[in-house]
Amino acid sequence: MDGQPEARLRETAQDGFVPNYLLYLLAAASEAASAQFHAHVRAQGVRVPEWRVLACLADRDGEMVTRLAGYALIEQSRLTKIIAQMDAKGWVTRRGDARDRRRVRVYLSAEGRALAERLVADARTHEAALLAKLEGGDAARIKQALATLISELGAAQE
Amino acid sequence: MDGQPEARLRETAQDGFVPNYLLYLLAAASEAASAQFHAHVRAQGVRVPEWRVLACLADRDGEMVTRLAGYALIEQSRLTKIIAQMDAKGWVTRRGDARDRRRVRVYLSAEGRALAERLVADARTHEAALLAKLEGGDAARIKQALATLISELGAAQE
C-alpha cells in the first residue's frame, strides 16, 4: 500500500480494490440491471415483489408459499402479505394443498397469467439486449458461471 | 406455454424462466456471496455499510462524501449518518476540502486504515475461494463481463 495520500486518492474507478472486487461487481451489476427493468415493471402498475411472484408462478403454478419465498428471494412473512394483496387484485388465488390443508398453494388467475406472460416476454427481450452487449463467449458463459457460484454458496450454507 | 397444470408444476429449480434469468442469477449470486462475507464482517464488529466505506477509503483516502455514495452503493443521506458514526468510533475523520470548505472529504484514521486493510485482505481471500469454484475460463472472464454490464447500464441511464 502506497503511503502517499496523493497517490492513494485516485480519480478513476478503474484502479484499486473495490472496482475489481467480485462482490462489488455482482452487487453493482445486479442493482443497475434490476433498476432498468424494474422501472419498466412499475410503469405497468406492478410492484417489484409482485413481478417476482408472477415470474415464479409462470414457471411453477400452484407452488407452495414456503417454496416461493426462496425462489422469489423474498422473506416468507413479507411474501404472505404480498400474495394476499395479489389475491385482492385478482391475479392469484390461494388454496390448501389436497393432502395437507395447512400448506397453502398459490395459483395464477387468467388475468394473472396473462400479466405474467407479458412481463416474462418483456424480461426476455431486456435480457437479450443486455447479453448482446457482452462479447460472444461471455454472453454464453456468464449465466453458467453465476449458477455455479449460487450452487457452491448454497452448498456451503448447509 | 404448456396448458397442463401438472406439467407447469415443476419440482426442480433447473427448469423454467426464473432459474435461467440473468437478473435472477445476478441477484441470487450477489445475495449469497454477500451473505457469506458479510457474516464475517459483522463478526469483526463492523456493520456492512461501514465495511463498504472502509473498502472505498482504502482505495481512495480523502474521497468526497458525494462521490463515496456512488462508489459504496449507499444513498447519500444514509452515508452521511454512517460516516458520522464511523467518526465517533475513531475510524475516520472529516475535513472540508482545501478549495471549497462546503465539500467534505473523509479520511481513514490509523485505526481505520488497519481495520480496512485487514478486511480487504479477508475479502481478497474469500473472493479467491469463490473464483476457484469456477472453471478456469469463467474465473478469468466473469469480472470483465460484469464490468461491461455495469458500464453499459450506466451509459444507458445518462
Image: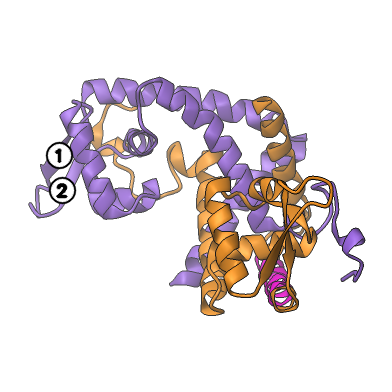
Chain colours: A orange, B purple
On the question of residue B74 being in view, the answer is yes
Query: As rendered, which of A65 and A54 lies closer to the eye?
Result: A65
Disc 1 to disc 2: CB gap under 8 Å: yes
Q: Specify few, some or many for label 2: CA neighbours under 10 Å numbering under 14, 14-19, or 20 or more.
A: some
Q: SS class of the residue under badge 2? A: strand
**A59 to the left or right of B56:** right
- Residue B35 in percent (x, y) is at 53, 34
Do the residues marked 1 and 2 share a common chain? yes
- Residue B89 in percent (x, y) is at 20, 26
Q: Give the range drawn in magenta.
A: A115-130
Residue B94's disc is 1
- Residue A61 in percent (x, y) is at 78, 61
B116 shown above or below B15 = above
Q: Amino acid under label 1?
A: Arg
**A55 to the left or right of A35:** right
Q: Name the residue under label 2.
A: B104
